[in-house]
Amino acid sequence: MKKVISQATIDRLPLYFRTLRLVEEEEKQIISSDELGRRLDITPEQIRKDLATFGQFGRKGIGYDVHELKNKIANILGLHNNWRLAIVGIGHLGGALANYGNFDTLGFSVVALLDINENIIGSEVNGLKIENSALMKDVIEKKFVDIGVITVPASEAQAVAEQLIEAGIKGIWNFAPIKLSVPANIPLVNEDLSVGLSALSYHMSQC
Amino acid sequence: MKKVISQATIDRLPLYFRTLRLVEEEEKQIISSDELGRRLDITPEQIRKDLATFGQFGRKGIGYDVHELKNKIANILGLHNNWRLAIVGIGHLGGALANYGNFDTLGFSVVALLDINENIIGSEVNGLKIENSALMKDVIEKKFVDIGVITVPASEAQAVAEQLIEAGIKGIWNFAPIKLSVPANIPLVNEDLSVGLSALSYHMSQC
DNA sequence: TAGATTGTTAATCGATTAACAATC
DNA sequence: TAGATTGTTAATCGATTAACAATC
């Protein structure tokens, strides 16, 4: 039953989801792979292939039910789990993420903010108090945190990852530009801004 | 001469660059593909293949000169161009990017901040004054901006992209969760946080 | 019925991995 | 010379694209 789905497919699902939401707002009931593809610059064959991985969602000759497909994708991605996030390292980036509204709309909630800096512990960001990293295990257990978001400097990131795992976290979203070593059963996604920016630089240099 | 390099290779170059920097700080002169691979969880064959795309950098039986390879990669990525960035939309994320120190170390400079909100125009972020988006063309020409960073809401992003291009920008780094339409000669990199977070959710759901 | 569109199989393309000669 | 390590060719693997029968 646990077929292996390619990362490329998984990474396209959020795009489909996002677009179906917009289409839903436009009060369209049905959408074809062709139309969805046009909106995303993805071929309709690719979309049908991706979706077929998870079952038969469409109707031949008709298309896909927008509302139904949107919910199916949300389920596949596990967005119904109401994942709870803790952000570790409340600098500029951590603070921005704490304030970032779009997570809620995807079914994620930021429930804890942690930092080691005495000067900011106790202060509030977006209505949430910054707590002492030293109490991480306590906070994470009490607040049922699922996902640890790492926005500390690269030099601290591995240690923070280990603390998070020790505290019982189930997944890590890492913004520090460094390769983290984590056990195979802890999903890890890296969000390295320098990769995208460097790729942009490369393409601009080719012009 | 203009061989086509795969995006996968281009996306790994910044990781090599980052690691070579660290290795350089450790005062190591020479590194093997094996050691580099161990540090990044990438196979040595993959690394040698990637590097061979651009020429012969290593010495058989010895390895790669750390300093030389680092500079070669920087050149390939175009990091010597001193690209100048303008951030459009100084909300939480735009503000965080304006304050983000790591860009400088990669050879990028944030030289302009733009917003339409009268209440924040004129105020300073990280020593840089927020200017009126209505004056975009002026600002971009006067400050020789190369790259437009889009951190406005999704609903505004396409219009901003068009204004940026009209103003003579050479590349776009887009953080708005929407597919932008831009001419083929304008490199565009999308940084969609919801993709990574959704992928994390997917993998956590499989456990 | 004719037109539209899915789901799936087959063909192609491209990226990764394996193997090894060259050489320091 | 023996051991280490690159650069490159060949083999494999996986993802995308093309084609088309099924069916609304």
Image (cartoon, coloured by chain):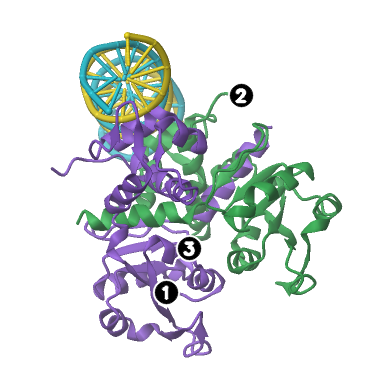
Chain colours: A green, B purple, C cyan, D yellow
B162 in relation to A112, above or below: below
Q: Is residue B183 left or right of residue A152?
A: left
Separation of marks 2 and 1 at Cα, in angstroms: 44 Å
Name the residue that disc number 1 marks: B88
In the image, residue B138 lies at what x, y percent? 28, 85
> For the residue carrying disc 3, how many other residues have a C-alpha within 10 Å: few (<14), some (14-19), or many (20+)?
some
Q: Is residue A42 left or right of residue A102?
A: left
Which image quadrant for residue A61?
Answer: top left
Which image quadrant for residue B149?
Answer: bottom left
Instruction: Identify the mark nearer the N-term, 3 or 1.
Output: 1
B138 in relation to B157, above or below: below
Name the residue that disc number 2 marks: A2
Count of number-bearing discs: 3
Instruction: Say what secondary structure mark 3 lies in.
Output: helix
Residue B145 in view (yes/no): yes
A135 in relation to A50, above or below: below
Q: For the residue marked with disc 2, what is the amino acid?
A: Lys
Label 2 or label 3, whichever lies nearer to me, is: 3
Q: Is residue B90 left or right of residue A153?
A: left
- Which residue is rendered at x = 47% and y = 90% of the image? B122
Label 2 or label 1, whichever lies nearer to me, is: 1
Task: Please tell me the numbered disc located at residue A81.
Answer: none
